[in-house]
Image (cartoon, grey):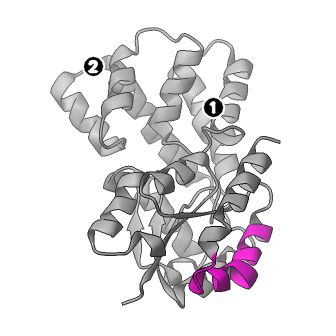
Amino acid sequence: MKKFVFCVDSDGCAMDTMTYKHELCFGPVAVKIFNIENEKAFLELWNKVNLYSRTRGLNRFTTLQICLREIGYPNVENFYKWATTARELSNNSLAKEIEKTGYEDLKKALEWSLQVNSTIKAMTGKDKAFDGALEGLKALHAYAKVVIVSSANAEAVEEEWTRHGLMEYVDEVCCQDKGKKEEIIASQIAMGVDRNYIFMLGDSPGDLDAALANQVNFYPILVGREKFSWDRLRNDVLSKILSGQYASMQQQFIDEFYSNLEK
């Protein structure tokens, strides 16, 4: 049994899918489903919240409620409550809540999410792995268990990783249906993995927060510098991880991560 575990985010980290999904799918579908009047302002807000700020990478339902609150969208109080209190923020969880309550704003949120999924699925040929990700995952898998830890839809993640040859180097897939990222990491600890040997690889502050919540390690995939990040991990940082030197270096990587994100 490999003692190291690498928890790897998908969109924006291993897969170059995050930007086009938000710019062409998530935001525009929200404009349509919720009949947003000021489309330009809403899409600018959507992209800022989801791509270019410290809320980058949060669950889709979390950022939907953030953006709807920001513009003062009316009559979605039930959705706000669900999105901020539900243990599992997924389509299945939302569908179960609709069965219990029948609230119209929950139905609209689910309609949005399902239409986003179908829109993404129809956009064939746009997804790709970041340069360096395949080689990086192969190097990690030689020494460690590799777990996909993503807040995205599991089916879409598995299809994308399989299509681009990444799944060969994955041992486990944990997406939104398995809980929040911090809960997924906690489950690895509960299975007996020493937290000192767990590493979260991600591109968003939510990935860092999930690591800190469990007192495990974090390595950033820098936005706009993804190939550099993967190559550095494979060629330099991995040896330091395996030799126990990484803990003393981690803060400099976190500082670099925030500095890069806020440019």
Task: Tell me the amino acid under the disc marked 2.
Answer: Tyr
**Does 101 sit left or right of 120 as displayed?**
left
Q: CA distance from mark 2 to mark 1?
A: 23 Å
The furthest residue to the right: 263
Q: Which badge, 2 or 1, is on the more N-terminal residue?
A: 1
- x then y, percent, for residue 32: 57, 24
Q: Quadrant of residue 220?
A: bottom right
Residue tagged by mark 2? 103
- x then y, percent, for residue 156: 48, 59
From the viewer's perspective, is residue 70 above or below residue 228? above
Quadrant of the image for the N terminus?
Answer: bottom left
Element on which disc 2 rests: loop
Magenta span covers which residues? 228-245
Q: Nearer the viewer, residue 85 or 155?
A: 85
Which mark is on residue 28?
Answer: 1
Task: Tell me the amino acid under the disc marked 1.
Answer: Pro
Q: Nearer the viewer, residue 198 or 101?
A: 198
Do we see residue 192 in this rendering?
Answer: yes
Quick one: label 2, few (<14), some, or many (20+) residues within 10 Å?
some
Quick one: label 1, few (<14), some, or many (20+) residues within 10 Å?
some
